[in-house]
Image (spheres, rainbow, N blue to C red):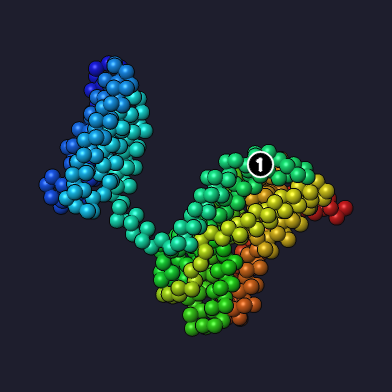
Amino acid sequence: MDNHNEILLLAVSLSLGLLIGVERGWQEREAEEGSRVAGVRTYGLISLLGGLAALIGKQLGWPALGLMFLAVAVVLVTVYVVNLRRSEDSGITSLVAGLLSFNLGALVILGYAMEAAAAAVITTIILGFKPVLHGWLRRLEPHELRAALKLLLISVVLLPVLPDQGYGPWQALNPYELWWMVVLIAGISFAGYFSMKIAGPGKGAILTGLFAGLASSTALTLHFSRLARARPEIRSALVPGILIACATLFPRMLLITAVINTELFYDLLIPGLLLFAIVLIPTLLWWREGLMIKHESARIKNPLDLAATLRFGMLLAVIMLLAEGLRLTLGEAGIYLLATTSGIADVDAVNLSLARMSRDGLSVDIARDGILLAVSVNTAVKGLLASSIGGRDLALPVTMPLLVAATAGLVFVLTEPTFLSALTDRVS
């Protein structure tokens, strides 16, 4: 490393400390003089000192770097203890930020300038978002915290230890892939719950339907349909909530296939967007009234039902076995039969199964037609449920658009050469 590079890197070390110092100085701008652990200049100098300590460590050995870090830590802790005696409310954040500044400055010299810069920016953002983070923490309910821990348990703890190989009949069950798909669905539902919580149900049935649709469009359809029958005066406001919840099925389908198999995603993109548009257009016609509804009971009560997640995993395993068995015994017709029957109750399981199989040898055309078949059946079922539960008043605004979308999906499948070929072969 020549002198010019050393000077440049030391300047970078200084700038990273100043970045953190500016945020800390702004947060503590009203604090009394001498009551702060460090100021803007001090953070910059601490980071610069870390860079110099790394240079010295390269010459004299790495224990020198460790000793200098220990000396800085002793000084910062001493200042913190003194301030703690003056005030009972003395946070440790500035102390940690000072220690972090030293290490970031050292990392720049050690050849990790980009990583140190990214860490400095993230640190500054976290420090600056204190009011927002504390506000979220105050609004966090116990069952939501437990749900977050459950999600971390099934994703961070359990997923990595599962074997990534096929088991069971036809080697159709891969524990790692099976659980990864469960985590994917649980994560989407979890994100949908907190999106709805942040936006608030008071924003209207349309936003409630949008976010609730990520968790369960069928549950939202049933709930709003019952509500429309019980309170007909707000029916026109509930309609866009039902429609937008059902419309989320199509981008959700595209999202799942994009994660698992991009080739299948591109095949589904045009029909998926077409079906989405068919449901979205009538939604927009009702949106003005939909934004006026305020109904707290529309909120989903459980952000992550672990029992339901496990049931979904078992359902997915059964569908994977049936899909592989039907494919081997009945050929392509078996896939379509499975998609039709599975779509009545659940789309995600058959979507994940066929997307995975398309990556492992199943024709992308067959997987696409099977997924569209399941989506179309599921959309038609929700449309019929809305009118049967909510009454005739929901038939035109809700059932009709959903049936039109379902019909369009079925027409797309029925006109596909792969489907016609499979049907002809089976009949003959």
Q: Quadrant of residue 14?
A: top left
**What residue is drawn where x is 52% and y is 73%?**
239
Q: Is 355 or 267 nearer to us in this picture?
A: 355
Q: Is residue 395 left or right of residue 142?
A: right
Residue 396 vertical placement versus 329 (above, below)? below
Q: Is residue 349 left or right of residue 117?
A: right
Residue at the left extreme? 33
**What residue is drawn where x is 35% and y is 25%?**
111
Q: Which residue is mark 1?
A: 359
Residue 51, visible in the rendered structure: no
Residue 388, visible in the rendered structure: yes
Q: Residues within 10 Å of mark 1 (few under 14, many from 20)?
A: some
Q: Is 285 or 354 nearer to us in this picture?
A: 354
**What residue is drawn where x is 66% and y is 68%?**
381
What amino acid is labelled 1 in the image? Arg
Q: Secondary structure at mark 1?
A: helix
Residue 232: image location, x then y, percent:
52, 83
Residue 160: image location, x then y, percent:
57, 41
Residue 148: image location, x then y, percent:
48, 55
Q: Quadrant of residue 134?
A: bottom left
Residue 89: image location, x then y, percent:
23, 53
**What residue is drawn where x is 28% and y is 26%?**
67
Q: Is 126 or 3 nearer to us in this picture?
A: 126
Residue 337 vertical placement versus 4 (above, below)? below
Quarter the N terminus occupies: top left
